[in-house]
Amino acid sequence: MISYIVRRLLLAIPVLFGVVTLVFLSLRLMPGDPALIMAGEAAPQEVVERIRQQLGLDRPIIVQYGIYMARLFQGDLGESVRTRRTVSREIGVRFPATLELASASMVIAIVFGLFAGLVSATRQYSLVDYGTMVGALLGISIPVFWFGLMAMWVFSVQLGWFPVGGRGTLRHLVLPAITLGAMSTGMIARMTRSSMLEVMRQDYVRTARAKGLKESVVNVRHAMRNALIPVITVAGLQFGMLLGGSVLTETVFTWPGVGRLMIDSINNRDYPVVQGAVLLIALVFTAVNLLVDITYSVVDPRIRYD
Amino acid sequence: MTERKKSKIKQSRGAFYHAFKGLLRNRSALVGLMMVSVLAVVGILAPVLAPHDPLQRAMRERLTPPSSNHWLGQDELGRDILSRVIHGARISLTIGIVSVGVGMAIGMPWGLLSGFYGGKLDLITQRAIDILLAFPPIILVILVVTMIGPGLWNAMMVIGISTVPAYTRVVRGSTLSLRDMEYVQAARALGASDFRILLRHVLPNVLGPVVVLATLYTASAILTAAGLGFLGLGAQAPTPEWGAMLSRGREYLRVAPHVSAFPGLAIFLSVLGFNLLGDGLRDAIDPRLRGVS
């Protein structure tokens, strides 16, 4: 068990290294002069020069890479070209908002997704099953930004139940969390259903039923426990996706998270902040995936022998 | 034609025939096929079907709600929304075809070679895939589009590249299991070159899962491109791209919700169509892929 975890952690190191390198190269591989692009075409020469020096673009690329890595190990992601604050500070202020939104969406997705999947599987080919699966498919197919806007129009503009945007109270959180969680709810519902149906065909479930156990006991104690194993993977991966996918939801609801910061920074050509935000999201995404793999190996020991 | 050739053709026709028959038996897949067909017809015949010029402005009639002359109303510049949605179908179709084409063109040979030869090549390329998979797809797309510049073609290329890991993984997995099959060994014993084995014996057998993946990824490409358009990183004005149209309508949500509502509905229905079709194809061709999307 420990050796598996150590192996997975060691495998993650080159991936993280590659992620950092790719993010570093993204600015350097940009066509044209990044300093000029950041400063804008009309900027005076000295401003362009200052940005160039600040980013170390006047040095050989390998030296730039060395400096970037050394700074990164100290938690230094550079400085915002626009606000002059450190990138880590800019992101640090916004990250809790993204985490809050992603967590709330995840709770919604797990609660509703699991419930829908279980109900659907235990009543296969019934109207409830069809209805639930159509709902799940709609959740997967609906564009999050359109769903958000339409929900805002109905519940905020027309009915006045929720604020139009921003962050603060629980009421601010409801619409963005439902919007962001719609796709994950659909995914989890579909996965739970197919996993449950597969488990329910197993011999040991038939045995449990043959023993005369109540249907609810068979479903919950025997089938569900094993059916949930693949669901853990999907739910974990979805959480990583929610962190990244919050860009669109945050834009719709002017939610002050990392995604919104990233888009604002793109519009302001503040590329150090864009890089920092992408790096953070990729690192968290990798960490979550790693955690999912390890959890999976804990709940299903067969995986460790693969 | 020799007897052997005849029976081979019959066999391959049989595989697709059964898949198609399976698809026709699936009611929701049929609905998906119909929705995708409508999208294709509307996209191809856009200039004929659109009642107005999608770029024609009429400032006096800006934000007018749906009427008998403009069935879906007019946007913030007085342009006919129905005509723009119809022309947008052509753009969405192009997005789907180009990005899926790019993803397949890179991902399939990569997966074939990686799975067939294995060894160091496989090890290195799989680590490269791991790095690409370490980014949530939309974040990777946003990062690259930001760097190479916004625009519809850039967006399509980058979306296509972001799907390469998925094709590579599926094709590599199938190739790995196929390369030690007896018929592949037999072909090798008969002196067939690696290229011939890959092209004639391995590739046809990995096409099924790839077709399923391509259909499902068309849906996600349309969705991602619309998302980029919404963020201002995809198609630029005045291109009638659904995501960009929706984004501009956002400012007028209080007074003219129809400006955002209809382009969004078009995205939704297109994505739904491809998802329904993809699910049906998956069940008909390869049920093992369940959960891949």
Image: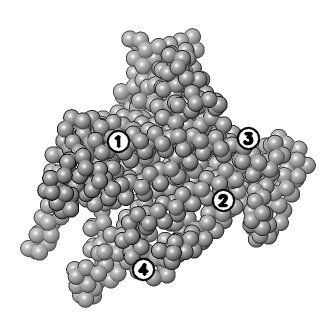
Distance CA(mark 2)–CA(mark 1): 39 Å
Can you tell which of label 3 and label 1 is closer to the viewer?
A: 1
Whether residue B53 is visible: no
Disc 2, SS: helix
Task: Give the quarter of the image for residue A233.
Answer: bottom left
Q: On the image, numbered disc 4 is attached to which residue?
A: B118
Residue at 74 percent across and 62 percent down: it is A72
Q: How far apart are marks 3 and 2 (CA)?
A: 19 Å
Say left or right for A270 vs B173: right
Query: Disc 3 is attached to a residue of which chain?
Result: A
Between B188 and B53, the one lying in front of the other is B188
Q: Name the residue under label 2.
A: A23
Residue type (three-letter) at the residue carrying disc 3: Asn
Instruction: Point out the tag, 2 or 1, that comes first from the N-terminus.
Output: 2
Question: A190 above or below B31?
Answer: below
Q: What residue type is labelled 4?
A: Gly
**Location of mark 3 (residue):** A268
Chain of the residue displaying label 4: B
Residue A75 is at least partly visible in this image: yes
Crowd around label 3: few <14 · some 14–19 · many ≥20 (10 Å): some
Q: Which residue in the protein does label 1 denote?
A: A115
Residue A16 location in percent, x, y? 61, 66
